[in-house]
Image (cartoon, rainbow, N blue to C red):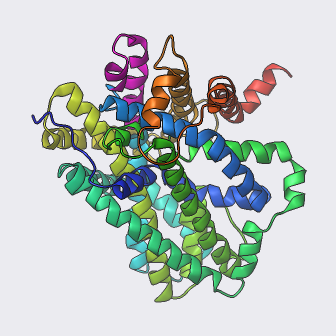
Amino acid sequence: MNNQREKLSSRLGFILLSAGCAIGLGNVWKFPWLVGQNGGAFFVLIYLVFLIAMGVPIMTMEFAVGRAAQRSPARMYHAVTPQKKGWRVHGYASLIGIIMLMMFYTMVAGWMLYYFVETVNGCFIGLENAAVGEKFGAFTGDWLSMTFYMVVVTVLCFAILSLGVQKGLEKVTKYMMLALLAIMIFLAVYTISLEGGIEGLKFYLVPNVDSFMKDPLTVITNAMNQSFFTLSIGIGSMAIFGSYIGKDRALMGEAVNVAVLDTFVAITAGLIIFPACFALNNGNVDAGPPLIFITLSNVFAQMGPILGRIVGGFFFLFLSFAALSTVLAVFEAIVACIMEMTGWSRKKTCFIGCIGMCVLALPAILGFNVLSGINLMGVPGKNIMDFEDFIVSNCLLPLGSLVFVLYCTWSKHGWGWKKFTEEANTGKGLKVPSWLYYYCKFALPVIILFLFGFGIFSIYKEPIMALFA
């Protein structure tokens, strides 16, 4: 095995890879809906404040630990503070977290490919709204079809990673992310130009005082929650890219660049969705998967046999790129961990990892059909994918972020603020200011714990309230 650590060839590659990891399907099927339902531009403003106040500092910490360690998430604490072994638990928990994330995300990425193929082939043309919904149900009920598309995604991504960091991961992600941005701009311009599209734009971005004042605490909490989870911080998926870059750039500036690109994609997704829904679907906008697979598929079907295929095809191609960029980035973190822990070559790791991931993704797939009766959360209507998502999004991401914050601010028990800022501020660009220390050490952990508790409460609200009834 070659022990020389691979590096990214350019700063652009680092930014696009990190942004590709952060840019996920939640940017498309959750953020626009939250904006529309929570006061429009008021929500965006609050979201940006919390993105700067929470997301950027934690991402900077994760980048710094990764760059200082020059190791994978599983071994980063071994390298940075070898004498403080307790932190290593988080390194291994990060590996478990990114594997569990891919156990259902590869399936969802497969959905995007399926809908791209079906849309281009005109399979939704002429279908009524109910029939479009039935098609999604029929697909998720067919475990063989879902498995096929999941395997396509998994094999494709591991094949790319087997070529190496520069020749495979960086090269492919660069082209894919640039194509994603170009497709989004084209779709946004087109949907806004539709008759009725401007009304959707107003609904999306014009400040809605009544909507905000109806429940300002919920609006603020939703903005805080989205700003935290949108960057995929806390489980080492950003630390791995920190380990692949040099020390010529300060890391807070790079974190800001990633956050800006992530936000651009999220906001632009709304510029596509709301004008289209107002122009062709009477302004009806759902949240989550129904927005993508039912509402928008019906919108594209109404555009006609030719235009519907073109616009819908581009839209699901954009979604496929968004999903694949995340899968590639997280798979790379898994591959790096396994290579360091086993000493295997990259190609051997990708081959065995591909087989293992295909097997591990089966429970989420079967949870929609064969194993649909299994409910591991104790909440009605939840399946195996929901359970896996709960463990990653509601537990490992916030608690992992808390670990990074404590590690970078505790001098006695962790890495400490001095060493963290020395690493983060090495190079040109935006530096971590010294006054941020007290905020990060005392306020940020409280905010993270609040979000963790809020996430648990939002899911188990009814049984918790029943205890006090």
Main secondary structure of the magenta stretch: helix
Residue drawn 43% across the image and 22% down it: 90
Residue 141 in view here:
no
Magenta segment includes 352: no
Please state the horizontal and vertical placement of residue 383, each as a whole percent of the image. 53, 40
Residue 63 or 305: which is nearer the viewer? 63
Tell me if residue 326 comes above or below residue 447 in the rendering: below
Q: Magenta stretch? A: 76-100
Residue drawn 58% across the image and 57% down it: 263
Please state the horizontal and vertical placement of residue 26, each as a whole percent of the image. 55, 53
Q: Quadrant of residue 40?
A: bottom right
Q: Quadrant of residue 120?
A: bottom left
Please state the horizontal and vertical placement of residue 33, each as a whole percent of the image. 68, 59
Residue placed farthest to the left in the image? 1
Residue 269 or 110: which is nearer the viewer? 269
Look at the image and tell me in which quarter the C terminus lies: top right
Residue drawn 39% across the image and 39% down it: 363
Residue drawn 65% across the image and 31% down it: 435
Magenta segment includes 81: yes
Residue 47 or 195: which is nearer the viewer? 47
